[in-house]
Amino acid sequence: MYAQSLSTWLERRGIHFSWVIVAITFLTMLTSSAALGLPGVLLQPLSTEFGWSNDQISSAVAVRYVLFGFIGPFAAIFMERFGLRKVITIALVLVAACLVLSTMMTELWQMFLLWGLLLGTGTGLTALVLGAVVANRWFEKRRGLVLGLLTASSATGQLIFLPFGAWLIQNYGWRMSVIPVFLCCALVAVMAFLLIRDRPHDVGTVAYGAAPDSPPPPLPATAQMTMMEPFRVLLSASRNRTFWVLAGTFFICGLSTSGLIQTHFVSLCGDYGMAAIPAASVLAMMGAFDFIGTILSGWLSDRYDNRKLLFWYYGLRGLSLIWLPHSEFTLYGLSLFAMFYGLDWFATVPVTVKLAGAEFGKERAGMVFGWIFTAHQIGGAVAAYGAGLSRTILMAYTPALYAAGIACLFAAVIVFMIKKPVKVAT
């Protein structure tokens, strides 16, 4: 009722209801990203209060990354079977519950259960596959731009929440830092329940850019798929060299972003004498540059060879990671790192989605990208645990930074193993 009324009211003013769907999806992915990034500012407080080592805490984060990734290939089926509204609402409620319950945890196994299993499941349902589904269902034009915008929501989550979370930890304790994210999850869950609809025809309109008299689209293939279908798609895609190149480079993407910098950057800065608030502010600066870079990447992906774009993204990221230990962690040095690293943090996503779509076709692209994204999260899990282990055993993050930087340079080279795709309309 609310969605139909709002759609009619907006249509009279020349605004398409699809932008409401994009706005709520953006907020959904933003709050999920904030929940995922929050442990990055909690490593030291948890270690101080409970005596848990860096690698113990990181292992729980690694479990979350793995689950976050493995749910991706099945997310599209869940959204088709149960609807966008139910999936988004349940996911946000689950994340909110995990955050509140985490303020009462006292044992390491409880952190594995809450931050590993439940948070990984909740955020996995609202991962990048959600953005891809919304862009494909609600837009005939501007898909690349919309996908870039939704991907950039992950950076915005950091931009808004992490510095404030660090300030709350410093002044009121780590438990208070989860409250803003919890409240946002609850608010967005209500908005999603009231306004999210599955397809344009549910509110009497057509996809953005489609002809006004367009008939309802046929029932998608995912609506009739069993839970075994993602495995059949994986088996088929695994025979394709492009799949392994995209999965391998996305593994390196996760290794060098969420698992390493998002999880350990505040702790890394602490090793060089920088307090949590300015360190989280640098992360927010990266988020600001990434917001620009990811949207720009979506625009560029419609116009230039996507392989060359990935070459520059991975190459610049690799050089910035290798340089980071030599920045002396001054304001000038970290600002340079934030700019070069931040511009391509999530910029790889729209380009990788486009390459997957060109190679595997629109029908299978979402599920294939789900498996590619799984590789990304496995890479994040490896880096989350590996960097924590490096910090515990070697008392330094430098080996992990060098390893991730070299891996990015390797990824920049192997992207040219993908054959040049035929340009497709988006």
Image (tube, grey):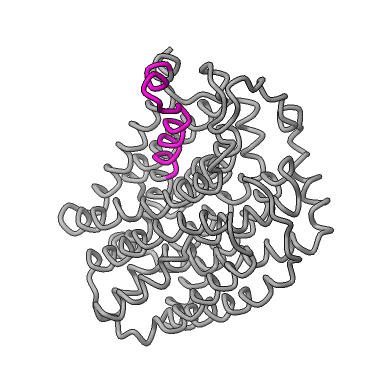
| Residue 2 image position (x, y, % from top left) | 40, 15
Q: Residue at x 80, y 57 (%)?
A: 238
| Residue 409 image position (x, y, % from top left) | 58, 79
Considering depth in this image, is 257 or 356 the residue closer to the camera? 356
Residue 414 versus residue 350 in the image, above or below: below
20 inside magenta stretch: yes
Q: Quadrant of residue 209?
A: top right
| Residue 233 image position (x, y, % from top left) | 78, 46
Q: Quadrant of residue 392?
A: bottom left
| Residue 272 image position (x, y, % from top left) | 29, 80
Magenta stretch, main secondary structure, is helix
Q: Residue at x 59, y 30 (%)?
A: 210
Q: Quadrant of residue 82?
A: top right
Q: Is residue 245 left or right of residue 290?
A: right
Residue range highlighted in magenta: 8-29
Which quadrant is home to the C terminus?
Answer: top right
Is residue 377 among the parts visible in the rendering? no
Which quadrant is home to the N terminus?
Answer: top left
Residue 317 versus residue 86 in the image, above or below: below
